[in-house]
Structure formats: C-alpha cells, structure tokens
Image (spheres, grey):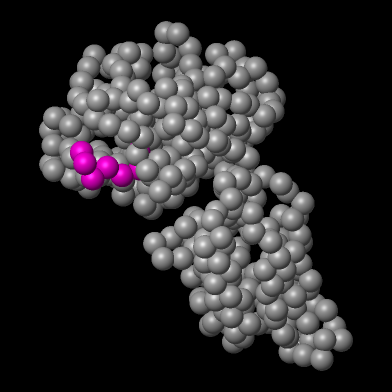
Amino acid sequence: MKKILLISLAVILVIIIACDRFEHELAPEQEAENWISDFFVEFADSIESILPAENVSNIMLFFQDDYNNNGLIKSDVEIFYEAFYYVNIPLEFEATLIDTSGYEIAWNLLVTSPDSEITFMDTLISDILIKTEDSYQFYGNQADMRNVMIEMFTAISCVNCPVVEEALHNLKEQYGSRLSYVEYHINDVLDPGNLPLLFYYGSQGSLPYTVINGNAQIITGSFPTVQQEIDDVILPLMEQLILVNLSDVETIINADSLYGSVQIELDPSISTDNLFLVTTLMEKLSTEHQNHNGENLHNIELKRETVSISSSGLQNFVIPDLDQLASGYQQLPDDIVLVLWVQTLENPYNQSTCTIYNVIEKLIDRR
C-alpha cells in the first residue's frame, strides 16, 4: 500500500511539471539568486538525510503551511517523503537545482539504489518560492483553490473597528493565501474616495462594515468573539466548488501606473453579465498610521479599479494615477500587494447575486 501511495504522488509531481500556471515575479538581483542557491543547498541536505522517517520533519520546514501546488498541499508532500521509508531497498537521494527565474524554481529529484544500477525516481519538479524573514520557503502556485475575499470599511477614528481589524489580521496569518482582505478607509487621510463604494454595498455610513465574498454584513462585538464569527462564515466558503480560477499574474510598475495581466478561467455556469475583475493595490503594513487603539494598520487600500470580463482568457488591467494617492501618502509605499478578484457587480447591489468567486494576491516588493 505504501509503495502504491508513493508512486501515485510521484505521478502528481510529474503532472506539476507540465503545468505552466505560475505567478511570474520580476527577475531578482544576482544577490537574491545566490540566496536562493544557498536555500536550495540546505534543502538538498535535508533530502539526503530523509531516512529514517523522523527526519521528514526537517524537510517540511522548507514548505509554507499553506503550500499548494496545483492542489498538492503540504500534508501531501509530507506523505510523499515519508513513503520512501517503507520502500524495501536501500535508497540514495540527490536533489539538484536546475533553474531559477525570479522566484520560480525548477529542480530534479533523483532516487537510486546505492550502486546506481536501479533508478527509482528521476523527476523534474517546478515550484515557487516565497521570501521569509531570513530565507525562502516553497509556496506553490496556489492554483485550483477557492479562496475568500473580505472587504472592510473602517476609519482611523472608528472606536469599534480595531477589534475587527485584529480579527482579520489573525485570520490572514492563519489561512495565508486562502484568505485575502482589504481595508477601505472612510473620511480620513487614508480615504481615496471610498464613500460611494460603502453606499453601494448598502451601508448608511456606520463603521465597521464588512463584506465577505460580496455578502455585506455588520460585524461588531468583542475579541475573540468577532474572530470566531468571521471564521464561521469563511470556512464553508473555502469548501465551495471552484467556478473561477485566477493564475499567471504578470505586473510591471512605474512611477504613475501599474500594468498587469491575469489568466481567468470561468466555469460555463458563470454568466459574464455584470462580471468584473476587481483590482486593488494596498499597503501591506503601515507604521506611519495607527488605528483608534494606536496599533499599526494592515492592508490599506491605495487604488481600486474594475474591468469588465466578457469571456475566459488572459485579462489585461491597469491601475493608473499612482502619484495621486490619498493625502496620507506622500508617495507609493515600498511594500505593496496587488489583490485581484472576480465579482458580479449589479447596479443596484444585490447581496444574493453580487458574489466574489475567487481571489488571488501578489506581493510587489519595491524595496
């Protein structure tokens, strides 16, 4: 049974090779390429010490907790490496870095008998790295998963908003790429003009106001009750059928605008009437601005644009006028995130049908 499991997972890894569904980061500097090489040497060393099975935990440290490569998640990778322990012949492992392009990485896993007469596995694996505080981790392409988008309307002066902001930040830390959220500021220095959007979603101006996958909800209360309330809503959404897939995000940014494209795959059941790609650029962390409790702010919206979607395929978009931000910004922040989602936007707003089908985000590090 263990051998069958190992072979099945090997087939999955081979399938990954054939899929070109990766986010394409701009090529890093040579120094970054050296860091990636150093990272891979450490990873290769952990592969070579795969036996006995308890050493698999060392390998898993190189994978993000929310790792997903075409549906292959971290627990699947762990099972894959553990399965080698149950093969009834001695094995030798060799992991070789083949190529890096930005944060995309291609490497080869060679598994042979000690005398090299039997090749048990010779597989090319494609993956994506994400930058950590002092190194990298495997992240995957995050394709083929139903993710959740939360839009929160807030203000620096809002007394009840910090509780919801803290809950969203904690849930983002917990779910990683499965959850995206953005904070729209209202009537403060960080507001680029969000009041019409707040009124579109049916609010009379009260804050905080939260929209989860297009469904407007007023969420208030104390911590951690608010976090549990939001968690109870988003968990079933993550398990829903994927009707829209977003992948292959490309971006080019200059002083005035961000230009980009994204591959959109629509299920035939999705109507393109009033269907839009929503593009939002946000600051990931602000140490210059604090909420009512004096805490740093996260995921502050800088610019929001919509593009009508008529069919599946590569969709181009532009986020213009980046030199005309809210008065709280003298210039575009160094560390920004692009968030893209597909949503039905009827006019007037209909809570039952203005659904967000899926979301993807891309870190754009300008430092």
Question: Seen in the image, is 195 located left or right of residue 124?
Answer: left
Quadrant housing residue 351:
top left
Quadrant housing residue 165:
top left
Seen in the picture, residue 199 relative to 21 is either above or below; the reply is: above
Question: Seen in the image, is 252 located left or right of residue 8?
Answer: left
Residue at 70% across / 81% down in the picture? 93
Residue at 37% across / 43% down in the picture? 334
Q: How many marks?
A: 0
Seen in the picture, residue 104 relative to 292 is either above or below; the reply is: below
| Magenta-colored span | 283-289
Residue 305 vs residue 65, the one in the foreground: 305
Quadrant housing residue 249:
top right
Verify whether residue 284 appears in magenta: yes
Locate residue 153, reporting x and y percent. 28, 27
Locate residue 123, reporting x and y percent. 76, 67
Residue farthest along the right direction in this orientation: 117
Quadrant the N terminus occupies: bottom right
Locate residue 147, reporting x and y percent. 50, 40
Residue at 63% across / 40% down in the picture? 248
Residue at 75% across / 75% down in the picture? 110
Verify whether residue 88 appears in magenta: no
Locate residue 49, reporting x and y percent. 60, 84
